[in-house]
Amino acid sequence: MMPNRGCMLAAAIVAALVVAAPAFGTEGASADTLFARGDRALDAGDADAAEALFLEVLELSKKDHRAEHGLAVVGLMRDDYDMVIKRARKAIKRDKKNSRYHLTLAYGYGIKAQQGGFQAMFYAGKFKGECELAIKYDPGNVDAHFAVLQYYVMAPGFVGGGADKAEETAAVISDLDPFRGFMARAFLARREGDLAAAERAYTAAVALDTTSVDGWVALASFYLEQKRYGEAVPLGERVLRLEPDNYGAVYQLAKAHLLLGEDLDAALRGFTEYLDAGIDEPGLPDPAAAHWRLGMVHEKAGRYAAAKTSWEVALTLTLEHEQATACLDTLRERHPELW
């Protein structure tokens, strides 16, 4: 029930950074200055620095709802949804009509619902309720409309789901933001198994806004999932022209080259760039996955010793990496001389 860029990996809380916060040059700074620095840290993906700064804000002003919400976003970045819920509720207590705060709380509840368990239905209801409050306090909050759209699609009718409600919400999104409207239509079409309609919607979205990285990424991902690798490659290249440091696109383009099998050098460069960048961020493939894919490149190119090394590295990073284990087992059968 999270938006595209809401998908996130866990990261440990680094207490030392919190303790060492004055090293950032914050001593004597005002709450507004500290909050602005924390916001910039969030934009840069530095959850630890952001946390340290927002906690300093709260030391100066215990009722600062902006800092509480900032800490909720830190929780999202770390996959710590208890932290999201706790901090977002505190922010809302101090600013009850803030649409953004209600949506952040909804994301926390939504992921808790997706985790299953006996409380899943309880959290699903809370997710829906917070989305509706976000829309109530800001009817133009497209992200909130998109979130509740996903609820209507996934939830059974007896708890408020339904295709008719989803269609109505998609129409509202289209009125507010035509680009996001096409993305909503694509989402609905895919849920219904209408891949042709989904492709038409994605194509309409990128035609409407040719500068949107989100649109090109969505269409490229769609082609990858349909194993239309030749069509995914130029779209991935376009994304990187628009946003050269989009490492998700770097990885997916390398994957497309690998699976297409026509330019293994490009696949090698892509996975190597991804690994050299030290990427371990929310929503992106982890280093073990990149080493596994890199091993596949080496294997296809006939560099079996290098493939073995890559898969062994993947296993050192993730001990039970099933794909790397299977690849090594097959390689051992075919090339026992490497052992």
Image: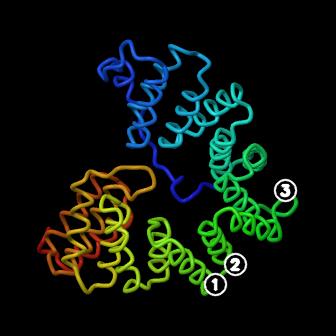
Instruction: Report the front residue among 208 and 77.
Output: 208
SS type, badge 1? helix
Q: Position of residue 110 (x, y in %)?
A: 66, 49
Q: Which residue is mark 1?
A: 197
Looking at the image, which residue is at 56% across and 82% down?
199
Choose top left, top right, bottom left or bottom right for residue 150: bottom right
Discs 2/1, front: 1
Q: Position of residue 263 (x, y in %)?
A: 23, 82
The amino acid pointed to by label 2 is Glu
SS type, badge 2? loop
Q: Quadrant of the C terminus?
A: bottom left
Query: Gap in Å between the C-alphas at discs 1 and 3?
Result: 28 Å
- The earlier-in-sequence mark between 1 and 3 is 3
Q: Which residue is mark 2?
A: 192
Q: Is residue 308 left or right of residue 260?
A: left
The amino acid pointed to by label 3 is Val
Choose top left, top right, bottom left or bottom right for residue 123: top right
